[in-house]
């Protein structure tokens, strides 16, 4: 990995965390209106948070691996 790949990956880690927090907050707030049990709401929000983080991190890793190949 070169410097550009590392920079792209680090940026994707930061934005993946931000996206995961946003997804958690949105899911938690919306599910609080529909479920009475806070434990179910917390589980669903954490599941969404984990999926969002994994998805955007994988997308960032793919971008970090392929973008430098196209730029050279």
Image (tube, helix red, strand yellow):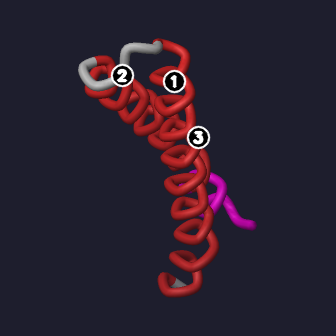
Q: Is residue 65 visible?
A: yes
Horizontal side of 63 relative to 31 (left or right) equals right
Q: Which residue is mark 2?
A: 35
Q: In which quadrant will I find the C terminus?
A: bottom right
User: Callout 2: few (<14), some (14-19), or many (20+) C-alpha neighbours within 10 Å?
Assistant: few
Nearer the camera: disc 3 or disc 1: 1
Do the CB atoms of the residues marked 1 and 2 lie less than 8 Å apart? yes
What residue lies at 28% left-to-right and 25% top-to-bottom? 34
For residue 48, above or below residue 26: below
Residue that label 3 marks: 50
Work out how far the residue at label 1 is from the one at label 2, CA to CA, in angstroms. Answer: 7 Å
The tag on residue 52 is none
The location of residue 40, given as percent across then percent down, is: 51, 24
- Does residue 14 appear in the picture of this structure? no
Helix, strand or loop status at disc 3: helix
Q: Residue at x 56, y 38 (%)?
A: 47
| Pointer 3 with pointer 1, Cβ within 8 A | no
Residue found 35% across the figure and 31% down from its top? 27
Q: What's drawn in magenta, residue-wise?
A: 1-8
Q: Mark 1 or mark 2, which has the lower sequence index?
A: 2
In the picture of the structure, the residue carrying the numbered disc 1 is: 40
The image shows residue 35, relative to residue 71, as above or below, that is: above
Image spot of residue 38 (x, y percent): 47, 12
**Where in the figure is residue 66, as x and y percent of width and height?**
57, 79
Q: In this rendering, would 30 be left or right of 50?
A: left
Q: Nearer the viewer, residue 43 or 67?
A: 43
Marks 3 and 2, the one that precedes in the sequence:
2
- Front label number (3 vs 2): 2
Q: Quadrant of residue 13?
A: top right
Majority secondary structure of magenta residues? helix
Mark 1 is surrounded, within 10 Å at the Cα level, by few (under 14), some (14 to 19) or many (20 or more) other residues, namely some
Closer to us: 65 or 3: 65
């Amino acid at each position: 990995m070169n410097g550009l790949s590392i920079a792209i990956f680090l940026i994707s880690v930061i934005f993946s965390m931000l996206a995961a927090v946003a997804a958690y907050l949105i899911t938690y707030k919306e599910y609080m209106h529909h479920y009475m049990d806070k434990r179910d709401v917390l589980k669903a929000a954490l599941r969404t948070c984990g999926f969002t983080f994994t998805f955007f991190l994988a997308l960032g890793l793919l971008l970090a691996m392929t973008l430098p190949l196209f730029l050279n």
